[in-house]
Amino acid sequence: MEKVAIFVDVQNIYYTTRQAFHRQFNYREFWSQVTKNRELVVAFAYAIEPSDAKQKGFQQILKDIGFDVKLKPYIQRKDGSAKGDWDVGITLDLLEWADRVDTVVLASGDGDFDLALQRVHSNFGVQTEVYGVRPLTAGSLIRAAQAFHEIKGPLLLS
């Protein structure tokens, strides 16, 4: 059976589905699609530490589905800008788990991951799949993956 690892850039998926569709991503349907006829090795959802009960509840839903939720603090800088991205952490985990699976699935539209997917494929022979909102997913990321799955239809909550 094909072994799969899942990596979800929660902030990116939240903002792209909201911007494009004014709807939320259907994590249960995503899980069902990605794990069908596959052996799940690991599933990470990368998020920001919750600041309210609603975010805590959402992260509990992710855990209940089966995700290992990794949290990072949201940093507000003195100049008013903010930071809370997981790019380096996701990249390190992609590389760490690549030799244990046949396929990695990345849910994100962030083009910063294109080189990581290329490296995972070329160095480990791992197939790579990306789930993203097409108009908000970097072309370089789509090209770096062996398969691109557009977020639409059942992957969106009503």
Image (cartoon, rainbow, N blue to C red):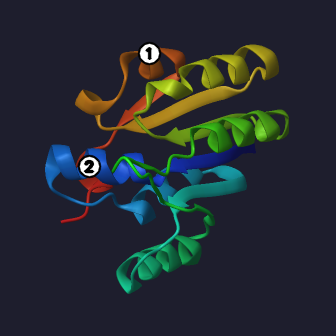
Snapshot quadrant of residue 45? bottom right
Residue 53 is at least partly visible in this image = yes
- The local secondary structure at tag 1 comes to helix
Q: Nearer the viewer, residue 29 or 136?
A: 136
Q: Nearer the viewer, residue 121 or 81?
A: 81
Snapshot quadrant of residue 1? top right
State the residue position of label 1: 140
Does label 2 or label 1 sit earlier along the sequence? Answer: 2
Is the residue 94 above or below the residue 56 in the image? above
What residue lies at 60% left-to-right and 18% top-to-bottom? 115
Give the tally of numbered discs.
2
Is the residue 141 above or below the residue 53 in the image? above
Q: Residue furthest right?
A: 99
For label 1, the crowd category at 10 Å Cα-Cα, with few meaning under 14, some 14 to 19 and many 20 or more, is: some
Between the residue at mark 2 and the residue at mark 1, the CA separation in whole angstroms equals 19 Å
What residue lies at 15% left-to-right and 55% top-to-bottom? 22
For label 2, the crowd category at 10 Å Cα-Cα, with few meaning under 14, some 14 to 19 and many 20 or more, is: many
- The local secondary structure at tag 2 comes to helix
Q: Nearer the viewer, residue 53 or 101?
A: 53
Is the residue 40 above or below the residue 127 in the image? below
| For residue 62, side relative to residue 11 (left or right) | right
Residue 68 position in % (x across, y down): 66, 65
Q: Quadrant of the C terminus?
A: bottom left
What residue lies at 62% left-to-right and 50% top-to-bottom? 37
State the residue position of label 2: 17
Residue type indicated by callout 2: Thr
| For residue 97, side relative to residue 88 (left or right) | right
